Amino acid sequence: MNVLQQDRRYLLLLVSAVMNQKKVPAMSGSLMPWRTIYRLADINQVANLCWLGILGLSSEIDKEIKGLFYESYQRELKNVSGYQSAEEVLIWQLERKQIHFLILEGKDLRELYPQKEMRKMDCISILVPKGDLVRIDTIMRSMDYEPQENREDEGILYYKIPGIYVKFYDKIKFVNLKLERYFDSPVRMYSKKKGYRYLRCFDKEEAYLYMAGRAANDYALGRATVRTVLDFWLYEKAHKEELNWPYVDKVLKRHKILEFSERLLKLGDIWFQNGISSEMDIYTAMEAYILSKGEQGRQLSGKILPLLQDVADFYKRDRRREWMNREKEALFPPRDYMAGMFPVLKKFPWLYGLCCLLRLWRIWFSKVKQFFAEKRDQLKAKLTRKKDAEEAPPDSQEEHENNIRME
């Protein structure tokens, strides 16, 4: 495989060896930049997986670095039961509260791996109707989850000790607007999961399209990782015999991510099955783009994924949405803020809309009052200067008249 740097090459060799249950070739520890390899593995969300590959290399690796790999693995090993239990409780609570929901990312992804702890779990991601977000906040707080700041996307993030993260979305968002519209159906319209009343799920084709769209989205934004490729590659391997490929290819082609999805799968073959291609320059560029977080290989990547050209529009849409949210908040402030201004809302919350209108009228009246006060002061100052000029000696009067004309 054609690669750019020794650390990248060895990282991919580690991941491939673990996924194929093969022994990792030993190399001199003095020649390997293990700290850099760990950092790269951690950024690409596979440090826990790599631990299984370096178990037999104890004499080759510095103890401190080996400890970092071990901690990553142990953390995920503990998280397997933690996240599984959290997901089961969330399903029970949302079913009990009669809220339609769809799990976008959960324990099912771990089932694709030979061992569940091989897949690093960032959070449980759940799609819900927008109107139920307030109820969900109450539910999450009742289960000792705390709201957290989310700097990655528009999901509402919650955290619970000892390290469980849950995100709720009211919309599936992509850089590709057409693909975003494809997944814009109400949650309740998706297939009902067997044995549940309110839990919905993608069918196999929808799940593949979602994973392809999510991979393309992360790739375009420079967020794709080795785990991104691994998730998509493993899903395709697990379900390729069951998928309706004519339909899948038709949708991917319509949304201009067919070539990208095919090449991403081929990149997975090259990384994890020692595959080869006559177009290694393209896959080398894709590898460099992913491992450098979009800093390298961008030109060739843009040819296989036109979506890269839409990233600027995506951020522009984000800024426009942020501006609209600020305007909305200016017109309709939070209820707690309004209750401080209008105590009557504590007793009669249904007067919120009327109080917002009254607040806007007060602001408008204050600005109008200020405008006329300024005009009055300006006129008064002008009349005072004119009067002073009339009462001044002739020379001074002429000078004042000139000043008035200049004004």
Image (cartoon, rainbow, N blue to C red):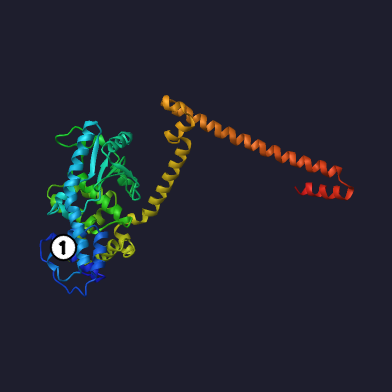
Residue depicted at x 41% and y 44%: 321
Q: Amino acid at mark 1?
A: Ser
The answer to whether residue 154 is left or right of residue 71 is: right
Based on the displayed image, in which of its 4 quarters is residue 191 positioned? top left
Circle 1 Cα neighbour tier, 10 Å, few/some/many (<14 / 14–19 / ≥20)? many
| Residue 190 at x, y percent in the picture | 23, 37
Residue depicted at x 21% and y 60%: 47
User: Of all residues shown, which one is farthest toward the top?
Assistant: 348
Query: Which secondary structure lies at badge 1?
Result: helix
Based on the displayed image, in which of its 4 quarters is residue 5 positioned? bottom left
Q: Quadrant of the N terminus?
A: bottom left
| Residue 278 at x, y percent in the picture | 20, 67
Residue with the mark numbered 1:
16
The answer to whether residue 174 is left or right of residue 396 is: left
Residue depicted at x 85% and y 49%: 396
Figure check: 277 above or below 196:
below
Residue 244 visible in image: no
